[in-house]
Structure formats: structure tokens, C-alpha cells
Image (tube, coloured by chain):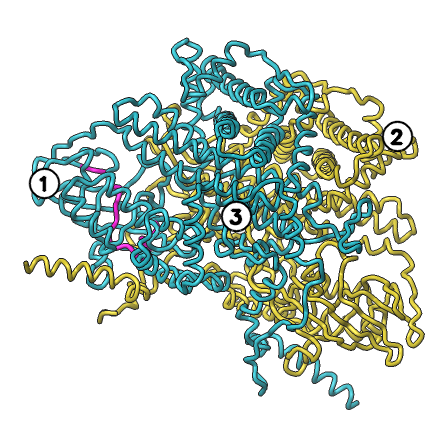
Chain colours: A yellow, B cyan
């Protein structure tokens, strides 16, 4: 490098400002158009108390160095993971210092917005201990875990085995002589794999292993075992453990692998709240009711369903605000003016952008009601199960499976749709949507692959259909599946009565349409399987379709019924929410039109009515678009986005972030010396020679 | 850290192997099922010579340290970009050493598979100079650029301005006194932005700036200007330049920004092959024919269309091979056996997976013909334009716009569909599909946002429709748009004649269906705009639909006609390709069913026939699935994937890659000391105290 000082950071000239009208002015004008009270909808969505906690926690985190986000987009995995450890420790301290409750702690994690080394300790290790320990084990494992004196993970999936728990290879053989279990990994494919927190962090693990007693295989059971030294954190003898390497997203989690080489653990390691192995004899005692464990699965999935609205809200907040600020092309037919001068049209005024973004807004509000009703059903079912009544379990389990599948797919697609609506700048990590997309994406695969899950829903739907046909199922308040199937059976040739766009704006007509379409699909699959000998495997494509149809029915229904009973809403707030409900229902019909038409329920002419009405509703949302994302109340700290900031300073913020780019900390890039200079100086030499000639 | 040696890398036990049957055995069994000659199809796809080059270049790169890929998944942006500079230099040397032609050089870049600091020098800077320089400028700019004595970029988009070139703010004011231009950035939003290679690499740039002469604004024109010192690479006075920071993908490109503060450049900088500014007087001479520049755009887009098949091929190769190896669940109805033992079912045997993957295979082969025909049309049009005949230009430009939009969307969706079919391991960067997805994704936005582009196609379609209605357009060999519109006008109430699945397997019937559906949509939009006063903006959603419909017609037609004239294909190869063509056409109808039904062309009963026939065709592809991706002939070096390797050693390869993870180079993670140990040792202390009591 030549003699000059290279450590001169690149800065933007201070005197330059964006060409007006600017973001803050444009957002102000948008906000002035609101037809409703933004704060009233925020309160309705989250409840006043929770909303206060949301804001409060965000304020605290903003000034905490351990929660700092400005470096996140520049760091490689090693730096990011180191920072994540710091955050985990600081959150434990903050919780104590500020006396945060579980809700506040969860909000802190939601706003911080990346899975960290300790995440699975809270998310899977402790809940499993909570559910599976006997009293002695609670003292031994759960209590120190609560104090972080042991840090755990949940080791189920293996290198060669994912969704199919019954296929796991790791064995735990009971040794009567010593009253121990011998944990062993017979093949490379039996290595535990993908286990969050296992890579470098956990010193304990709940390990799912096949229980073998006297040569008999009882299938996978949970063991709580120590895996690293509490003195110096080294892996214990008999254990090979490490990190599985970089992933698409989840950079700050140390997903790990682990192999056992005849690793002995004491009898107490076998988590025995439900099943037991008698010391010495090795007699196996079966769990009293296997169905109880379904409750946890439903809970985890209900949580994912509920979390989706926040994920989607983030995408929409960024995109809607940015599209209100970003201007592109002068619309010759209807030129926009500002201070009497023609300006380029804000991107949000193009109907294609409105169609893409406002339908996502409708999805967010739809998912709000879905999440809420899912939890209500979960609570109801748990209360019933405690009384020994398992009537609701199948319906709740089936709905939670299908809804996890459908709503995570909706969220992933919606987030990406929002990012793309941001055009070029949507690709900058400073949009806040790039890393976020990566971290959100695994939701479509984990906790049940979205395709595999639809089979669980469909199995229940087909069984229910057969019961309805056989007259063995009666509609009930909490089981709508039976209701719409019964209605279909009464008139399988029904058609939609709407003859105009206005007549489509009727909750009953729309709910019936979704019910009929789902029932028609279910009846077809039942016919194929029961009467034409189609195998389950051969029917899988249709099986995914009926699960989706059923779940869309649920979401539409819950949106309308939820609004009907939302007495706390004022007339303006109710009106805009109703518009969103109609938009959600009609746009969903639009995207699934072929199924509504193939069942004969909708005619081509009605199909056209639906499409036109969707555009009509989208236009109606236009003035409320920015207020509707404001009402989602996501703090700037969470968004971490130059494009989506609430103050609209998009371009200034992009430049500020660019100045932090490490490549801009020196004038001349290091690689210049070896990889650019040789070519360029050859040219200079040539010129010198030529000028001498 | 305690006293032990922490620098002990984690290794997998050498004696462990995957549980059988193994990947190599399973792939071998798949390959034995091929109904056709794999090599014959490879030759057909690429031509024998090009295929040899593909293999040859891959072999060279495999052993070149500068082209090494094993560290890519672990490195942060600074290391990756440094390595990319090394690659750029080495490629220049290799080209010389091995006397590579342009094709071989391009193949090398395709296999290396990341955009690098020099990419835009070749991709945009030199082609622009080639197209826009006068003779003097060729000597001054193009010749040193060819020798890499100057490195350039193409600076068009600005912080506040993307697709709308007419909105650019940067000015170039002619100064008659000195015969110079004054380049200036009036606002922050006028900063050049997103410019590939500008961040830290380029010392020259083609800058698009508004030409101002004597106060009159002539709109954006290209200038070739020096921006960094050739001596020491420092930015020249009057220029602020740097990198725009991290992106979703493109980590190894230094996309940059640049601001001019009254930066003076000599008259020669104005690229004047077409328009000119007379020295001194400043008289402006208009370009002779603005339409000539459309040729370049068509070429760039045709290239993207053609590249999509390789991108999709990569996704499918990885997913199909992996799904043939990955096993999950025992299918109780039809248990799979190997050596007389029941094994879990290979994932590829589930119809849902087949449906997702084999339709992507059909897309790849469809895009092969599309890319080929697109180039033929481009060549034909260029030849005609040189003769002064511009009749084809509008059709070719319109098709290239819509096809760029449709096929990049198909590719992105297909790649992600393939990645998801890989389940959990699809999220590991070792799948080879994660970084690849990120790098491919911008294709849907750059060179024309995929939504904006559809307007160009639709404008042409509507104009053509009006001409057909007015009797002013006659069908011709190279203009199929007029042909299908004319056919529609002759019978706008036509319906599909097929009454069985077998009757659907007819190219004429399928091509007609696509033509009718496109024409119906175009006629509807024309009606809305011409007779109901709908604004262009209000019609944008339908406008996107008709562009897509038109392009799907083109792809289907080209697939069938391309096969008809493919005399070099043997009967077995032709048969499997025909199955793919039917699958492509019918699956596309399936996904767009509502449009085919809303036009009244397909009845609900025919809709059902289509769906059933798709599944039938998918099943027919099953035995040829692995051979069909093998035929795409993508080298392992390109795939860089543990899951998609041609030898099937998935699990061994994953473990090998995991051992390279930096976190596995030490036993205990550095953060342990500060962030884990304090909690754990507190627990140990507590225990010691308790045991003393």
C-alpha cells in the first residue's frame, strides 16, 4: 500500500438531504387519512396491559448494549454467536433486576428476535422436564435448570431420522446388574442432529432413545443425561459432540450433533412421570394414557400459529410504510402533486402493489383471531381432558396441525411478498427483512413438516366424514367440522346464491362457501379411497388440499364470528376490521378459485364478481393502509429497518447504516495490492513507455 | 479457561457408517431403471461440444485453490470478498494459460457461481462501451478495459430511483468554456446506488446522468468517467464513493454508491456513438433510431431466461438425488424391502414429493426450449433490424419482458420447492441450496421488476388485439400472438373438445387451450379499458395475469414444436421428453385452472380430468427421475452440496463438512468463560456447601 493514511472512513456529505417530499411528510399525510383510532385497534389486538409491556420492554432493550442490533447485519457467525451468549446472560440479569414476569421475558425475546444458545433450554428442555419428571427428578434436574446451573437441550432428531420418531436409532439398554442405562449410537445416521443449544452450550440433554430391556425394544423414551463437565465444560468420555455448521438462518443458535459410545447413565436419568422401568427387575410399566402428550404438541403449534401474525405484521409494517414513501414513475393519466408540483407516484398508489400488500394486512388481522381462538380451544380441551373427557382432543389436534401448516406457509409467503414490494432496497439487509426471512423460514419445516402435517388433519376430516355419513356424528358448538359436513350432505348440489358483489359481502354466504368447498373435497377423497381403492399415498396431493380447505374455513369463520362478539370495538374500528374480513375471505376464494368452481358451487360469472370485489375492497383499504400497520404497534427496535422506521427517514437511515459497513472504514480495499494494482500499473507502465516513444 | 489443551478438533468416529441401504446403492438402483440413454439427452440439451467444455472446465476448477468452495459456507463477507478478488485474477490468468474462449470463461463463472467484484466489468461496463463508444472512445476506454488496465462498472440506479430511468437526478451540465461536463449530485437521493463493482473495485464508471446544455434538460445519457486514482486507487477529488453494505445474497459483490460534487470530466467522456454534443457550441444531435437500444435489453433478458434452466436444474438435481436416498416412515400399506428386510420408504416414493419435484423437472426441460427459441428469435430480429425491418421488434421485446418475469419467478419458486423437499437438511448450508437461493433471488427484481415488466408485455398484447379486431394484423410464422388472437376472435365461445385424460394428451388441444385462455384475458382487459373507461393503473392486476397467460402459451408451444423438430432424439429419449411436455402443459393448466374455467373453455369435469392426468404423468416419470436430473450434467463442483452429490454419499459428506466448522476446532467455546461458567459454578459451589452441611 502506498504511503497515505488509509484509515479514513467514508462519510456522506452532511449538507445533502433527500429530494422532497420526504418520508416524514409523506407518512404524516398518510396518518392524517385514518378513518379510525389507531390506538383503539392496538388495544383491541393486544389488550391494554400487554401493549404497555410491549412498549416498556422495547424501551429498556433499546439502551442495553447486550441487545444492540446495529452490528448484526455486518457480523459473521462467530461474532454473532458470541454476542448472543452475552444477550442470554444479560436477559437473566434484567429479568431479576426489573422483576420481569414470564410475559415480559417473552416479549424481550420477541423484540430481540433471534434464537440464541439458551433458547432451547427454555423452549424445550425445561418444558420437557416439567412434563416428564417425577418428584425426585424435578429436584435433581428442573430446579438447577431454573437457576441456569445446568443448561439443557432436547435431543430427538438424528442425522438419518427426522419426522418419524419411531425410526430413531439411538439405544438405551437397561443394565440390571448396575441399574444403569447404556446409551449407544450404532451408526453414523444415529448421531443426534439439529439439536438447538447442543453444539457448544448445553451440559445436559434430554435424549430420546429406544428403550431396550432384556433384549426387547420398547421404542423411543426420554432420558435426562449430563453431557459436558460442570467443572470445565469438556464433553464427557463416551460422548462426541459439536456444532452442525452454518444454516439458512439461525446463525446465533449452536444446533449440534452427538454420538454415544456405550455411555452409561444412572437409573434416575429415565424420565418416569408416565412410563417406568423397575430397578433391578427391569419390569416396564406403560404410561396410563398416551393421549395426554398431545396437549403439549397442540400448545407448541398454537404458539406458532399465534406468532405468525407478528411475523407477518413485521413484513407489512416495513413494506407499507416504505411504499408510501418510495416514489416511482409519473402516472401520466393521474399525475400526483405536492405543493402544486407534479411528483412521481408513491408506489403504494399502484393497484398491483395495493393488491399484494393489503391482502397481507388482511391476513395479519385474520391470523389474530385464529391465534386467539386456537388458544381458547386449547384451554377448553385441556380443561375437558382433566375431567376425563377426550371428545375435543381429535378436533383440536387436527386443527392445530393443519393451521400450523397453513399459517406458517401464509406467513413465509407474505413476508417475501412484502420484501419484494420494497423493490431493490428490499435486498439490502438494512431493510430488516432479509435475515428475518431466513430466521422465520424454518417454521414451515420444524414442529412437523407442512406437507406431512396435512395428513394428520385429513385423517381426522375423513374419519369425521365417514361418521357423518353413517349418522354417527352430531354438530356441536365447538365442532364446526361436523356442522359443515352435515350441511353438505344435506345438499351436495348446492350453489352460491350471490348475484352481485354487494351480495357477496355477507358472512353467512362466505362461511357457507368455504364449508361447502371443504366438504366437497373431503367427500371426493373419501370416495377415491373408500370406493375406488385409492391408496393413502396416491391420495396425498388431494389430502394436502382438503387440509388447507378446512383450515381456510376455520380462519374465515373465526374472523367473522370474532368480530361479531368484539363488543369493545367502536363503529369506525369495527368498520375497517369488517372490510379486512371481507377482503380476507374474498381474496382467499380468489386464490383458490378453481376449487370453488370445480365443486360447482361458484359459477364463472360469480368468479368474476369475486375478483372485482377484491379490487374494490383493496381500494377501500387504501387510506387506512399506514394506520393499519401503525396499529400493529411494532417498535422500531424490533423492525431494525431503514425502510420501515416509524418516522419515515428512509434514505437518511440507509446512509447512516452504510457508514457502518466495515469496507467503508478504509479508503482502499486490502485486496487492491494483489488483485487490482498489478493490472492497472501494467497499464500505467505501458502509457509511460508509449509517451516516451 | 482451565489448563487443558482446548485446541482439539471434534472428529466423527472413523468406524461408524450410515445405516444401510446406503446412498450409493440406492442411486445405483435408481439409475438402473432409466428408460433412456442419459448421455444422449445431455448431448441433446447442450450439444456435444459444449457438454465437453462443461466437463472440462469443471475438472480444471476443482483443483484450483482460487476457485475452492469448501470455505464458502463458513466465511463472513470480508473473507468471501477477498477470496472473490483472488478468483477474478486467477480466471484472467487461466483464460490465458489454457487459451479458453468466451464460452469456457462463461462456464467457469457459471460453475464458480457467485458474482464477484469484476463481474459487472464484463457484464455491463464493457458491453456498454462496445455499444456506445465512437472509434476514439473505443481506443481510450474499451481497449484498456479488455486488458484490465481499467476496471469499470455501470452506474445507473440511484438511492431514490430504480426502474424509472427518466427520474434520475444526477446532472451532467455542459460547460462550453472548457468543453467539459460538470457531474453533480443535487440531493442525497441522487447518489448512485446498487452499482456492482463500484463499492471498492472500479476505477472507471459509465455514469447515466441528465444531460443539461444551456439550461435545457435532454434526459439521461451515458458518460464514461474515471473515479479512482490509477496510481493508488484513492477516490478522486469531488467523488464520494463506497460500498452499500450487506445484502440478501451477493456477498462477494461490492455494490456501491457514489456522489459527485461538481466533478468535471472532459468532452470525450460523453459516449457518443448515437447522440452527440458538438464541442463549443453545445449543439445536441439526436440518436438516429432509439429502438436500436432495445436489442441489448432483449439480449440480457434472453440470457436470464436461458440461465433459469440451469438454476432450476441445480435445485432439482440436489433434491431428486437426496429424496431417492433419504428414507422416512414405513409405508404400512406397501412396505419397501431391501435384501428382504423392510426399510423406511425413500421420500421420493411419496406422491406429494413426486408432485412437487417432477413438475420442477418438467419446468427445466420446458425452459430449455424456451431459452433456445428466445435466442433464435433474438437473432432473427437482429438480422431483420440490420436490414431496416423492425416488424418483429415489438413482439420479441414483449416476449422477452414477460418471459424474464415468468421464468425467473418459476425458477425462484422451483428452487425453494426443491430445498423444502429436502426437509431439515435442506436448511443446512451444506445442502448447497441456501446461499444459492439468496444469490439467485434478485433475478426477480433486477433487469426489470417482475411485476413492472408485465406491463410492457401487456401493452403489446392489447395493441395487437386492437389491431386484430380492426382487421389490421395478419398471422405470420414468427408472430403467434396474432395467430391465437385471430383464432379466438373467430370463436370466442369455443370450448375444449377433450372428453378423457387420453384425449388431453394432444399438443394441438393443449396449445389451443393456452391460446384461448390468453386471448380471453386480453379481450377482457381491452373491454375494461376501451369500453368501460378503466384506467391502466386500475387494470394492473389483470395486466400481470395476461402477460403470464401469454408467456405460458409461448412456453407450452415451444416445448411441443421444439420436440417435433428434434430429429436427433432417439425413440426412448423422445418418449420421456414428450411425457415431460404433457406434464408441463397439464400441470400449468392445473395451477392456473380458474382462468381456464372462468373463460368457459374448460368445464369442472374437464378440470378433474386434468388433475388426474397430472398425477398419472407424475407416476410415469418416477422411474426416470434420477436419470432425468443426471442428464442435466451438473458437476459436483458446481452443486457444492452434501445432499446432491452424484455418488450419493450424503451422510458421510455432511459429517466431513461439519468437521470444518470453526466452532468445532476447539473443545470449549470461548464464550463459556464469561457467559456459561458463572451460572454453572455457582451451582457447584451450592452443592459443595450443601454437602458440607
The residue pinned by badge 1 equals B176
Q: Which residues are magenta?
A: B196-212
The residue pinned by badge 3 equals B314
| In this picture, residue B291 sits left or right of residue A404 | left
Other-residue count near label 1 (Cα within 10 Å), few / some / many at <14 / 14–19 / ≥20: some
Of the image marks 1 and 3, the number of the one nearer the N terminus: 1
Other-residue count near label 2 (Cα within 10 Å), few / some / many at <14 / 14–19 / ≥20: some
| In this picture, residue B179 sits left or right of residue A393 | left
Hey, which quadrant is residue A526 in on the image?
top right
Alpha-carbon span between mark 3 and mark 2: 48 Å
Residue A469: numbered disc: 2
User: Is B367 in front, or is A496?
Assistant: B367
Which mark's residue is nearer the viewer, 3 or 2? 3
Q: How many marks?
A: 3
Which residue is painted at 70% across and 36% down in the image? A552
From the image, which quarter does the C terminus of chain A lie in? bottom left
Amino acid at each position: 500500500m502506498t504511503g497515505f493514511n488509509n484509515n479514513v472512513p467514508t462519510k456522506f456529505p452532511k449538507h445533502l438531504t433527500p429530494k422532497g417530499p420526504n418520508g416524514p411528510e409523506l407518512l404524516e399525510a398518510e396518518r392524517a387519512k385514518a378513518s379510525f383510532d389507531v390506538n383503539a385497534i392496538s388495544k383491541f389486538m393486544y389488550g391494554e396491559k400487554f401493549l404497555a409491556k410491549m412498549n416498556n420492554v422495547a424501551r429498556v432493550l433499546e439502551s442495553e448494549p447486550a441487545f444492540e442490533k446495529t452490528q448484526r447485519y455486518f457480523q459473521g457467525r462467530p461474532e454473532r454467536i458470541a454476542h448472543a451468549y452475552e444477550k442470554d446472560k444479560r436477559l437473566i440479569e434484567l429479568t431479576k433486576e426489573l422483576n420481569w414476569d414470564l410475559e415480559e421475558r417473552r416479549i424481550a425475546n420477541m423484540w430481540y428476535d433471534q434464537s440464541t444458545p439458551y433458547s432451547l433450554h427454555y423452549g424445550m428442555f425445561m418444558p420437557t422436564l416439567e412434563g416428564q419428571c417425577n418428584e425426585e427428578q424435578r429436584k435433581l434436574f428442573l430446579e438447577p435448570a431454573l437457576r441456569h446451573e445446568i443448561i439443557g437441550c432436547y435431543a430427538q432428531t438424528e442425522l438419518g431420522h427426522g419426522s418419524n420418531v419411531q425410526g430413531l436409532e439411538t439405544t438405551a439398554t437397561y443394565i440390571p446388574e448396575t441399574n444403569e442405562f447404556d446409551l449407544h449410537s450404532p451408526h453414523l445416521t444415529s448421531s443426534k442432529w439439529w439439536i438447538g443449544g447442543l453444539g457448544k452450550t448445553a451440559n445436559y440433554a434430554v435424549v430420546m432413545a429406544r428403550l431396550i430391556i432384556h433384549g426387547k425394544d420398547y421404542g423411543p423414551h426420554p432420558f435426562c443425561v449430563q453431557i459436558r463437565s460442570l467443572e470445565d465444560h469438556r464433553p464427557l468420555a463416551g460422548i462426541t459432540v459439536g456444532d452442525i455448521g452454518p444454516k439458512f438462518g439461525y446463525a446465533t443458535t449452536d444446533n449440534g450433533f452427538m454420538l454415544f459410545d456405550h455411555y452409561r447413565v444412572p437409573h434416575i436419568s429415565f424420565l418416569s412421570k408416565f412410563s417406568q422401568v423397575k430397578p433391578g427387575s427391569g419390569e416396564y410399566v406403560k404410561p396410563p394414557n398416551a393421549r395426554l402428550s398431545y396437549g403439549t404438541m397442540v400448545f407448541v403449534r398454537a404458539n406458532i400459529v399465534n406468532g405468525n401474525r407478528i411475523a407477518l405484521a413485521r413484513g407489512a409494517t416495513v413494506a407499507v410504510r416504505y411504499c408510501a414513501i418510495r416514489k416511482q414513475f409519473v402516472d401520466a393519466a393521474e399525475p400526483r402533486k405536492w405543493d402544486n408540483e407534479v411528483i412521481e407516484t408513491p408506489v403504494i398508489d399502484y393497484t398491483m402493489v395495493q393488491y399484494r400488500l393489503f391482502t397481507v394486512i388482511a391476513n395479519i388481522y385474520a391470523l389474530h383471531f385464529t391465534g386467539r381462538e386456537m388458544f381458547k380451544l386449547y384451554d377448553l380441551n385441556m380443561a375437558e381432558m382433566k375431567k376425563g373427557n377426550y371428545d375435543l382432543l381429535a378436533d383440536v389436534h387436527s386443527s392445530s396441525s393443519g393451521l400450523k401448516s397453513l399459517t406458517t406457509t401464509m406467513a413465509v409467503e407474505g413476508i417475501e411478498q412484502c420484501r419484494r414490494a420494497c423493490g431493490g432496497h428490499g435486498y439490502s439487509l438494512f431493510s430488516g427483512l432479509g435475515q428475518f426471512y431466513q430466521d422465520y423460514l424454518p417454521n414451515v419445516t420444524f414442529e412437523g413438516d407442512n406437507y406431512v402435517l396435512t395428513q394428520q388433519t385429513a385423517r381426522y376430516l375423513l374419519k369425521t366424514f365417514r361418521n357423518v355419513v353413517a349418522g354417527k356424528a352430531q354438530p356441536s358448538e365447538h365442532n364446526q367440522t361436523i356442522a359443515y359436513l352435515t350441511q353438505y350432505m344435506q345438499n351436495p348440489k348446492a350453489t352460491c346464491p350471490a348475484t352481485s358483489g354487494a351480495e357477496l359481502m355477507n358472512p353467512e354466504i362466505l362461511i357457507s362457501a368455504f364449508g361447502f368447498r371443504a366438504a366437497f373435497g373431503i367427500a371426493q377423497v373419501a370416495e377415491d379411497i373408500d370406493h375406488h381403492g385409492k391408496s393413502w399415498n396416491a391420495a396425498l396431493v388431494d389430502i394436502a388440499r382438503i387440509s388447507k380447505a378446512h383450515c381456510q374455513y376455520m380462519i374465515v369463520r373465526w374472523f367473522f364470528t370474532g368480530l361479531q362478539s368484539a363488543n369493545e370495538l367502536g363503529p369506525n374500528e369495527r368498520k375497517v376490521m369488517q372490510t379486512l374480513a371481507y377482503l380476507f375471505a374474498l381474496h382467499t376464494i380468489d386464490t383458490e378459485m378453481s376449487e370453488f368452481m370445480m365443486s360447482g358451487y361458484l359459477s364463472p360469472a360469480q368468479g368474476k364478481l369475486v375478483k372485482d370485489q377484491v379490487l374494490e375492497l383493496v381500494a377501500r383499504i387504501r387510506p387506512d393502509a399506514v394506520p393499519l400497520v401503525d396499529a400493529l404497534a411494532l417498535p422500531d427496535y424490533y423492525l431494525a429497518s431503514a425502510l420501515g422506521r416509524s418516522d419515515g427517514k428512509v434514505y437518511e437511515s440507509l446512509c447512516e447504516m452504510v457508514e457502518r459497513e466495515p469496507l467503508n472504514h478504509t479508503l482502499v480495499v486490502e485486496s487492491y495490492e494483489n488483485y487490482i494494482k498489478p493490472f492497472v500499473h501494467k497499464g500505467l507502465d505501458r502509457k509511460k513507455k508509449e509517451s516516451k516513444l
